[in-house]
């Protein structure tokens, strides 16, 4: 069943009013995507499940803050999930490079929910990342998708920490310019 | 997290960059905490963070969706279930303030209490602070239950690393405080860990409290009754 952005938004607003049915509908519509996000960062199903439970309980409690944060509904949910997963990752221990996380994960394809992120936007950012040096683009993706820290990234690309900071900051600036074109 | 001295001029980066690094989760804990404080008061910074969040989120499109285990939906349904009206009249939550929250797996009525406290739980504060935790371990070390309280999230995470209840019994976690009777936190799930919301009344007592694990009949004991079975272990809460 396709879900549009406004469906997800309506569900969040209902959850803010304490509507438990809406909460479970929101879970049905978004949990597969958010589980994917957690799994991508943590690469551990049990941990990802645990974090996803925290995430949905936070959503249940804090849905009323959604209207104040200025984010679109899926951005907010993905942000909450990604932050929780990265917090868990950082609490775990210094991470080792793990480029195979995605490969090891069974690609189950899109879940029942429609993508709430416009395909055009996904293509745009892919194009803009494509304009960067491939290693720098991979560093941005490593930070965003895998939750890698500057230290992780410096190790992974075998460059000094400050070089990595410079790479990332310049890449972000280029990305912003490209996306605003 | 160590930083090179040569890096210090970089600390004066523009807000635009800081916001992007915040969104990417690249700031070290102190910087992240400072940024979160600013988010609460600085609308311009909040707007930059929102812009970067929207700018970068299309990257998540490539992450494949993955259906989570069915048990998670059931747990969330139980945790958010309203208290059954027959068992708990309308103002029962106030009368039974001492009941923190019910847990999962069989303690259906207890789980139903969760809603009342979630509603009463204050919103997350922006700054991550210390956690308070206790490792409840028996002398023989065949029981290890960790209870970790995060005041910022108003959440208690309970993890059972070792220990099984005798056949037909359950293990129950208790919060022991200076000024209240033993408080039934809940029945431990069979495996894994569990996060439960904590109301301020108990949240402010946890740092000075102790956690204990007892053996109870299925469904567990209540505050009014207190632990009925053998207390396997007790541990003091310490800052972590």
Image (cartoon, coloured by chain):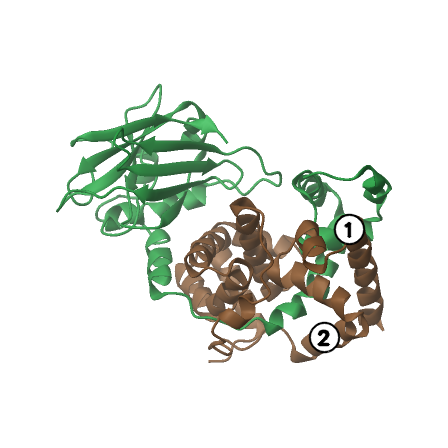
Chain colours: A brown, B green
- Residue corresponding to mark 1: A160
User: Given the image, what chain letter belongs to the residue carrying mark 2?
Assistant: A
- Residue B215, given in percent of the width and then of the height, sits at 19, 36
| Chain ID, mark 1 | A
Q: Quadrant of residue B237?
A: top left
Query: Relative to A76, does residue B229 appear above or below in the rendering?
Result: above
Q: Secondary structure at mark 2?
A: helix
Query: Residue at 51% across / 40% down in the picture?
Result: B122
Choose the circle earlier in sequence order: 1 or 2: 2
Q: Is residue A107 left or right of residue A179?
A: left
Residue B213: which quarter of the image? top left
Dividing the picture into quarters, in which one does residue A75 lie? bottom right
**Closer to us: B222 or A167:** A167
Number of marks drawn? 2
Residue B221 visible in this rendered orientation of the protein? no
Q: Is residue A75 above or below residue B28?
A: below
Secondary structure under badge 1? Answer: loop
Q: Which residue is mark 2?
A: A126
The mark closer to the camera, 1 or 2, is 1
């Amino acid at each position: 069943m396709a879900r549009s952005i406004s469906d997800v938004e309506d569900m969040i607003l209902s959850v803010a009013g304490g509507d438990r049915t809406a909460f479970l509908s929101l879970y049905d519509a978004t949990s597969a995507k958010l589980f994917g996000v957690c799994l991508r960062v943590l690469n551990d199903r049990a941990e990802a499940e645990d974090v996803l439970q925290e995430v949905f309980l936070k959503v249940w409690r804090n849905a009323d803050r959604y209207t104040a944060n200025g984010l679109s509904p899926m951005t907010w949910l993905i942000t909450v999930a990604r932050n929780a997963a990265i917090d868990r990752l950082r609490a775990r221990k210094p991470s080792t490079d793990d480029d195979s996380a995605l490969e090891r994960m069974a690609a189950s394809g899109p879940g029942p929910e429609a993508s709430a992120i416009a395909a055009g936007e996904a293509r745009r950012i892919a194009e803009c990342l494509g304009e960067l040096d491939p290693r720098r683009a991979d560093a941005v993706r490593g930070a965003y998708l895998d939750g890698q820290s500057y230290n992780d990234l410096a190790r992974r690309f075998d460059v000094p920490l400050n070089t990595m900071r410079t790479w990332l900051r310049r890449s972000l600036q280029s990305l912003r310019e490209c996306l605003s074109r | 997290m160590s930083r090179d001295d040569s890096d210090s001029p970089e600390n004066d980066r523009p807000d635009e960059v800081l916001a992007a690094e915040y969104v990417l989760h690249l700031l070290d804990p102190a910087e992240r905490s400072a940024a979160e404080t600013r988010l609460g008061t600085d609308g311009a910074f909040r707007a930059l963070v929102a812009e970067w969040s929207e700018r970068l989120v299309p990257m998540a499109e490539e992450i494949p969706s993955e259906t989570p285990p069915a048990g998670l939906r059931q747990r969330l349904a139980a945790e958010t279930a309203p208290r059954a009206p027959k068992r708990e009249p309308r103002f029962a939550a106030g009368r039974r303030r001492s009941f923190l929250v019910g847990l999962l797996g069989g303690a259906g009525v207890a789980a139903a209490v969760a809603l009342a406290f979630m509603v009463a739980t204050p919103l997350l504060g922006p700054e991550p602070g210390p956690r308070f935790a206790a490792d409840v371990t028996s002398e023989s070390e065949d029981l290890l239950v960790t209870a970790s309280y995060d005041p910022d999230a108003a959440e208690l995470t309970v993890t059972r690393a070792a220990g099984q209840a005798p056949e037909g019994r359950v293990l129950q976690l208790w919060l022991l405080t200076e000024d209240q009777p033993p408080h039934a936190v809940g029945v431990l799930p069979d495996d894994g860990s569990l996060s439960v919301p904590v109301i301020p009344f108990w949240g402010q007592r946890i740092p000075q409290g102790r956690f204990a694990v007892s053996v109870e009949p299925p469904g567990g004991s209540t505050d009014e009754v207190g632990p009925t079975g053998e207390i396997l272990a007790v541990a003091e809460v310490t800052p972590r």
